[in-house]
Image (cartoon, rainbow, N blue to C red):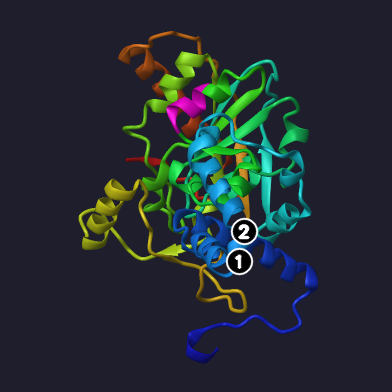
């Protein structure tokens, strides 16, 4: 182990190499979507070295930033074949990731899948709601999930169209209302803790950013969509993160960046492509995505604070029950509890 780094053996089976490649693809896409330097460098290079393509490139940029800019808030542009690529099977098997169904869902209703925890890259939730890698459509026939992400992740040229093909949409109120009002079965998957929760993502952590989150409850009341708690056991074990306790210099810097850019950059590390010690890839650790029972919500045109608070309390109690019912199955000690901040 030179320099304390454990290197992967040379004779790794091809299947495992393909799994690693699928995860490299996901991490690269994710990083480029929040820091789109590479897509812009590619477009700039084409403009400089292939000027004959300039009219096409300029037309494309006009289309995505003017004509088509609201698509991310109007259900995206999901393509079934994209969600069913064998790529996602290799991606799933790297960890592996599985989906546990605890209750049937009526396809004539609409649902808000409330996903916890965020982790660093929300890998388990993407595999479940952004692909068919875990067999979502087979387990929940008639349900069309729209995975929500920050609008900034859908700004990069080329990447935005690739991501939207998986059914991903911007996580705005407008976007959620549009999807939930698009007909029976249309549902949204929200990572409720958002970017702020990524700062709590470290092995063993059960801290969720939920105390001041009420927007998802209000949307449920406005649309009559049922709330479904979802917990991905193992998501926080995929990466390690530099210590950043509340009040520390690093946490203050991260907070300021979040206010400016809309997301908080965690300082994390995992494994590499050819080593198991250091890199930007997640560790091979099982992720078990448990989808709970729906909480029926009666539609209210203009919900007041009391109505929101009542449903919020129902939801948090259901989430705690879901966590406590399954935690010992997935390596979490009996005395471990969820911590809402």
Q: Could you tell me which secondary element the residue under label 2 belongs to?
A: helix
Q: Are marks 1 and 2 in contact (CB under 8 Å)?
A: yes
* Real-space CA distance between mark 1 and mark 2, rounded to the nearest whole angstrom: 6 Å
x and y percentages locating residue 111 in the rendered image: 58, 24
- Mark 2 is surrounded, within 10 Å at the Cα level, by few (under 14), some (14 to 19) or many (20 or more) other residues, namely few
Q: Residue at x 50, y 51 (%)?
A: 156
Quarter containing the C terminus = top left
Provide the residue designation for mark 2: 53
Residue 177 lies left or right of residue 50; in this view the side is left
Q: Residue at x 37, y 26 (%)?
A: 214
Q: Is residue 178 above or below residue 55?
A: above
Residue 138 lies left or right of residue 108; in this view the side is right
**Mark drawn on residue 107:** none
Query: Which contiguous range is marked in magenta?
Result: 172-177
Quarter containing the N terminus = bottom right
Q: Could you tell me which secondary element the residue under label 1 belongs to?
A: loop
**Mark drawn on residue 50:** 1
Residue 329 in sight: no
**9 vs 340, nearest the viewer:** 9
């Amino acid at each position: 182990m030179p320099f304390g780094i454990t290197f992967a053996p040379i004779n790794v089976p091809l299947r495992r190499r393909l799994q690693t490649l699928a995860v490299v693809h996901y991490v690269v896409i994710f990083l480029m979507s929040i820091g789109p330097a590479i897509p812009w460098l590619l477009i700039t290079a084409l403009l400089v070295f292939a000027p004959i393509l300039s009219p096409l490139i300029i037309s494309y940029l006009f289309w995505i930033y003017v004509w088509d800019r609201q698509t991310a808030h109007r259900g995206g542009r999901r393509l079934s074949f994209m969600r069913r690529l064998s790529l996602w099977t290799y991606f799933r098997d790297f960890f592996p990731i599985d989906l546990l169904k605890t209750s049937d869902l009526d396809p004539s209703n609409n649902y808000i899948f409330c996903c916890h925890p965020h982790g660093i890259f929300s890998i388990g939730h993407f595999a479940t709601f952004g692909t068919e890698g875990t067999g979502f459509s087979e387990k929940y026939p008639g349900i069309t999930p729209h995975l929500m992400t920050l609008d900034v992740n859908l700004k990069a040229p080329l990447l935005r169209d690739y991501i939207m093909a998986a059914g991903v949409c911007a996580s705005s109120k407008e976007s959620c209302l549009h999807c939930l009002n698009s007909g029976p079965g249309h549902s949204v998957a929200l990572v409720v803790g958002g970017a702020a929760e990524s700062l709590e993502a470290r092995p063993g952590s059960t801290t969720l950013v939920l105390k001041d989150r009420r927007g998802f409850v209000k949307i449920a009341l406005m649309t009559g969509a049922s709330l479904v708690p979802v917990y991905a056991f193992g998501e926080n074990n995929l990466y390690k993160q530099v210590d950043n306790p509340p009040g520390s210099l690093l946490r203050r810097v991260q907070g300021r960046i979040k206010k400016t850019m809309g997301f908080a950059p965690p300082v994390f590390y995992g494994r590499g492509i050819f080593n198991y010690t250091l890199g930007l890839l997640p560790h091979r650790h099982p992720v078990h995505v448990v989808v709970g029972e729906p909480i029926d919500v009666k539609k209210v045109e203009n919900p007041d604070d009391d109505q929101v608070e009542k449903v919020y309390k129902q939801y948090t109690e259901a989430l705690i029950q879901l966590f406590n019912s399954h935690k010992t199955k997935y390596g979490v000690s009996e005395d471990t509890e969820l911590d809402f901040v």
